[in-house]
Structure formats: C-alpha cells, structure tokens
Image: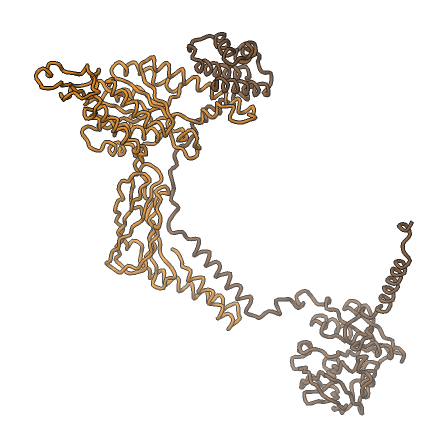
Chain colours: A orange, B brown
Amino acid sequence: MAISGRVPLLLLLGLVAVVLRPEGSTVWLWLLGVLLLVGIDLAVAPAPASVTLTRRQPGTVRLGDPATAGLRVAATRSGRVQVRDAWQPSAGATDNRHRFHLRAGESRRLTTPLLPRRRGDLHAAGVTVRTWGPLGLAARQRTYDVPGTVRALPPFESRKHLPSRLARLRDLDGRAAVRVRGQGTEFDSLREYVRGDDVRSIDWRASARAPHVVVRTWQPERDRRVVIVLDTSRTSAGRVARSVDEDVADGMPRLDAAMDAALLLGALASRAGDRIDFLAGDRRVRARQRVHGVRDVAARLQEQMADLEPTLVEADWDALAGGVQEFGRQRALVVLLTALEPSAIADGLLPVLPALTRHHRVVLASVRDPELGHLADVSATDRPTADAVYDAAAAEHELERRARMEEVLARLGVDVVDADAAQLPPALADHYLHLKAQGLL
Amino acid sequence: MTLTRPRRTTVLVALALVAALLVAVWSTRGSTEYPTPLDPRNPGPDGAQALAEVLDDQGVAVTVVRSADALEDTTVGEDTTVLVTATAALSPRTLDRLRRHAEPARLVLVEPSYSLVREIDEDLRATTVYPDEVEAACEAGSAPAGTDLSDLTIEVDQLTVFTGGDALDGARCFPTSGGVVVAESRAHDLVLLGAGQALTNDQVLRADNAALALRVAGGSNRLVWYVPDPTDAGADEVVSLGSLLPRWVVPGLWLTALALLGLLLWRVRRLGPLSREPLPVVVRAVETARSRGRMYRRSGDRRHAAGVLRRAARTDVAARLGLDRRAGTGEVVEATARHTGAPLEQVAALLDDHGHVPASDQDLVALAQELARLRKEVRRG
C-alpha cells in the first residue's frame, strides 16, 4: 500500500480541533478518524490486478538513437492509476511515470521515451501499478514483470570513412580511368585508347580490326571471401583511449573499437562484391554469420554484434580456427580482430596460425593503446619520478615484446594492422583496398 | 625622563575614579540586597524596614527568616506571631510546612493570592479592589485574637479583600463592597491581611495604617517575619514554561509529530523497486604494464630497468639513423656519436649495457632523462 500527501495534511487539519478542545484525547480521536478514512479508502481501492498490461516492444535501434517503449493499460474498474514503466538505467528511460484516470473497460496507451547508452539487449525492469481509492488517501501497489527488450546496435561510427573508401574502390574498379593489368585482376571489357592509358594494356588483335586503338580494361577480382574473426576474450575488455590526445575515461573497450573496424570492412567488402563471413568468440564461438548477397551487410553484422560482451577468459584459437575452416576451404582473407598482446598470442594464436596461413591470407588487426606510448615517454614531464621511470621501463619492455611479436607474425606471413581505436577502421579498410589493388586476395 | 614618571593629572584622575567607585559601592550598600516588596530589610518605598525597626524599638523581638528550612529551625511558641509577606512565592507544600510549624502561634498572611487562599479552603475567595478609605467596623464581636482594631481607618491605593462563608468564622474587619480586608479563620487558625500597602515605608504614615500594622504584627512579644523563598517549592510545583503556554500546544505538537510521520510514510514509499544495471568488466588496457612497473620498483631491479631503457633507446636510435636492425651495440654507439658529435665514451656509457649501472633511483631517473634527451637529439638531427 501507499498513502498520499493528503494524509499528513488531514492530520494537520486536526490542529483546529485541538485548539477548540485542548485535550490529549482529541489527538487520538482525530488520528483514529484519519486511520479509519485511510482504511476505508484502501478497502475500496481497486486491486492492481484489475489493470491489465500489454507491452509493445521498442525493437532495435542504433546506439545513440532514441526509441519508444509502448504499454497498453486496460482496467476492469474505474479509478485513478499510477504506472511506472521501469527499465535498466542504461536504457535511458525518461518520463516513465504516468498518472491518469481510467474508466472501467477503457484502455490507454502509454509511451516511454528511451535513449540507450549501452550496446546490447537492455531489459525492462518491471511495471509498477498503483491504484488509488476514491478519496485519494491510500493506494494499493504491485510490481509486475512485463518483459521488454530494446536492442542497441553498435553505433558504426566509422561509417563516415565509407564514402572515401568506396571512391577509392571505384578507382580500382573498371569504372574509372586507371586500369592496370595485374595479378589477380579479371578481364573486364575493351574500349578506345585515351591518352594516359598504359600502352601495355593495348589489345593489338582487337586494334587491328577496329578503326582506332583499343585497350583491354581489367577489374579487380570479385566474389572473394572475407572472414572476419572478432576476439571477445579477456584482452578485448581493456579500455583504451580513442586517439593519442584523448583521455582513457572517454575511451571504449577494445571490443567496441574492433567492432567498428569490422563493420567498416564488412560494408566496404560487400560493396566490392566480396562475400563476408563473420565469427566471434573466445573460449567458444559466440556468433557466426554468413552474409552473402545481402544489401545491408553492416546491419546484419550489427545485429550479430549487439549482445557480444568481453568475457574474462583466454581465447581458444583452436575452436575459432575450426570455425573459420567450417566456412569453407576456398581461399579467403581472414581478418583476426584481436589485441597484439604478446603472451596471449604466443600461447593461443601462434600454434594455429600456420594452418590458417596455409589456406588463407591472414591479417591481424589490433587496437593499439596510446597510453602505453605515453607511459614509455619519460621526457613528457620535466622531473620524472622514480615511479614514472620504472613504469617507462615496463612500457618499453612491453613495446619491445610487441615489436618482436610483430616480426614473428610477419615471418609467418601475417599482416599486422596496429592502430589507435579511432584510426583502426580506416587503416584496416585501407589495408584491404591495398590487398585488393595488388590482387593478393 | 618624562616616560618613566606618570603625569600628575593622570594620577589625579585615577584617584578620583577610585574614590567615586568607593562612594558608589558604599552608598548602594544594602539597598539592593533585599529588593522584595514588604521585606523587613528593604528601605525602599515598597519595603517594610520602617515597621520592622519600630517593632524592634517597641520591644518586640523580630526574627527574620528567609527560607522554609530556616523557619523550621526557629522556635515558635504560644506568644509568637508569624508574619508572612511576599506570599506570591509561597507554594502549596511550603504553606503546609509553614502551617504545621506555626501551629501554636498566630499566623498572619499578607495579601495571599487567589490560588493560595483556595489552597487553604475551597470556599475562600480573594479579590483586588481600589477603595479610598476603609473603616474598621469589625463584626462578629472582637477583633482577631486580642487586638483592638475598632476606630481605625486605613487608606491605601489597592486592597485584597476576602469572602468565604463558613471558612471565615473569626473576626472580620474593614468591610468593603467585595469582602473584608482583615479576616480571621479560627478553623484554620490564621489571619488574612489584605492591606499589604499599609505596611510599606511609603504608605505606613497615611491615615491609621501604622496603627493597623503595629497592632496586627506586634500583638505578641515575638515576631517571626517569614519572607518565603521561591526555591522552597518542590520541583513539581515550580512555575514552568509549560504552565504558561496555551493548553492546546502540547496536543498540537503531538498532532504535528503524527503529521510528520505521515509525511515520512508518504515520501518513503517508492513507486516500484530500484532498477539494477548489470555492469560490464572495465579494465584499463595499460594496467598490466603499470603493475609490471610497480614490480620493478618493489624489487629495486635497477639493472634490469636500465637495460630495458637502453635497449629501447638503441633500437629507436638505430631505426632513426637507418641502421640494420641486427646492428651491434658498438655500431649503434659509433653511428650515434658521429651523428650528434658527442664523445664516443660518453655515448657508450649511455647506450652500452656494460656502462654504468645506476646505484640509486635518482641515478636511474637521471639515466632515463639522458636517454630521452639523446633520442630527441637524434630525432631532430
């Protein structure tokens, strides 16, 4: 039950009675009267169970975009009703307390604006119904579990890099002036020679039959496979700054930066005519999706990534490599989105790499932590403390191990793309375009 | 030396001040000691010192007592009159003690209040009147216990008069429209005197006031003049702040407290439980490097820390100078010395692992700074 502000007011009104009859018993009689009124009101108030609640799911939104949670309230008895549609705090529910009068048999639609602040599935916490008695003194209250979920997709902030990369892709593609014959390109068409074309691409046989010189054009290979592997193990939980001059507090976990990079690569590769396979996991495979012949690849990938969270376990690369092989034995570009953490890679990834590189072209994309560079730089302050110097030594040690690991990986034929969180998506996209231009897929 | 000797005028002023102070203290001595009206030691206009002095001169032994305990220490016999002034300070329980102790003597209460006479007898009433002159005209035979009050006329500004049917069964003198000024109650063995002003220094000489005062107070050889002290009253009889407040205040406060409780119950009830947030694990990625740094620090492994810093500097410098990655230490040192123009030994001491091992944390800091400076120099050049 609950009482309203009218109860203390009614009690205060008893002061008049006390002034008129200044006895202790007046107080108790008045209290008794007020309690009686409250009791009657409570007894007459409709039960919260007389209100039926129906949820309209808010659906899926991109992180940072608003959503609306709907709730249909119907009552079998008239009365004043208060409803609170509670969500977990990061769902950003505002104005979720509703107060209205409902007649018997009537129903009403309530909407609660949501603004998700975290990626993933955000749940409703319960709907509280408070039904008031006719005097408005007392109410009955009950909380019901009315399941609701809003799915917040990864924001795909690197979308802004997509147009420039697509323009670069068109340069590679048959539609623009630069058409160079090379390894891994496919014959596209014949056209008239214009100045600037490579003389090596002139097709003499066709020119002989035509009134003018004809060149052959080439286009990059299409229908290649790109396998994106997202590591959600312990190393992906580390929070890093977005770029060198930003603070870690405004940063994000490595996993989110890796997702951004994966989304840009997926969107770009699908526009280039390649087929995307997506795999995410740590000790076991958590998400697996073949995205072939779909228009909006990014949306499908976002859907897959929405509820992925870093887990504090070591990655089982055997399982992940197995997952990659299950997509097919056709040669593919395998992009491993993991942290360049020497110990984690040496223990888990290195043993399975040869098997991968034998069949596929492997790229390791890692989110760099700019903080490590700051830590190693002693000259940042005029008078470094002993602590800072020991930290710098530790950071230099770590950087050195990383450099050595990069060398090892390069020797195994793995390309390493290591960049800050904000720079990784365009860097990975550029590397992909580079491979495509070279016909190395 | 004018500084060491005080000026004459200063001394004179100081002496005058001291003298004035002494005169003031002497002249006010005793005057404010007993400021209570009708006090036998109060020489002021409303005091009764004159009466006490005259009685003393007339051979009446006047004993002044100022508390109930002191009164109980004095012996009160047949030939004694107990005169009580300042009766406003008399609480019911002190009155009881007084009456018990003054049993054999005659008790005279001067201007007892309405509530005090109600304490003595339910039927007694005291009222205040403002008459001009009042004549004795005693009824019911004689005046109280052997005093002759007939043919007297008193003249005061304010009088307390008594009525009260059966309670006033003794002599009754000085009747006014509201009651009598001097009344005797044989049943309770006391005399009520309503003309308090007739005893004051100021008004004792008006009309026959002095005669009344002397005859009432000087009826016996001994007079015990009791000036009650308010502190004689029991703790529960003391006039408290509560008894001065309106009666509805206490129940009103109770009701307000109940209303506050209601307010609390109203505000404390939440509309549904708090909603919880499943929080993810958030670790700073650099945390492992930091803890490694702390481990170096705790173990004090300066040789290792210096080695790491030197190796990092060598790698960096070699890369800047375009040397092969596998180039030896000597090669790097030579190239660096050539590039910066610094002496070879100095650069070697800085970059070579076999160079000086820092003996203290300060040394390590200095080495780190030197290495950073060298790297910067190479980068600039």
In the rendered image, which quarter is residue A161 located in? top left
x, y percent for residue B48: 81, 77
Q: How many marks?
A: 0
Look at 27% across and 40% down and name the residue there. A60
- Residue A276 in the image: x percent, y percent? 23, 26
Image quarter hosting the C terminus of chain A: top left
Regarding residue B257, the answer to whether it shows in the image is yes
**Residue at position x 32%, y 16% in the image:** A414
A265 or A312: nearer the viewer: A265
Q: A303 or B104, which lies in front?
A: A303
Residue at the far left: name it: A209
In the depicted view, which residue is nearer to us: A234 or B195?
A: A234
**Is residue A313 visible in this depiction of the protein?**
no
| Above or below A189: residue A163 | below
Looking at the image, which is closer to me, B135 or A309?
Answer: A309
Q: Position of residue B308 (x, y in %)?
A: 49, 16
> Along the horizontal axis of the image, is B153 left or right of A288?
right
**Relative vertical location of residue A400 with respect to residue B195 in this rendering, above or below:** above
**A155 left or right, relative to A244:** left
Q: Quadrant of residue A206?
A: top left
Of the 4 image quadrants, the one containing the N terminus of chain A is bottom left
Residue A405's x, y, as percent?
A: 39, 16
Instruction: Work out whether B57 lies above or below A3.
Output: below
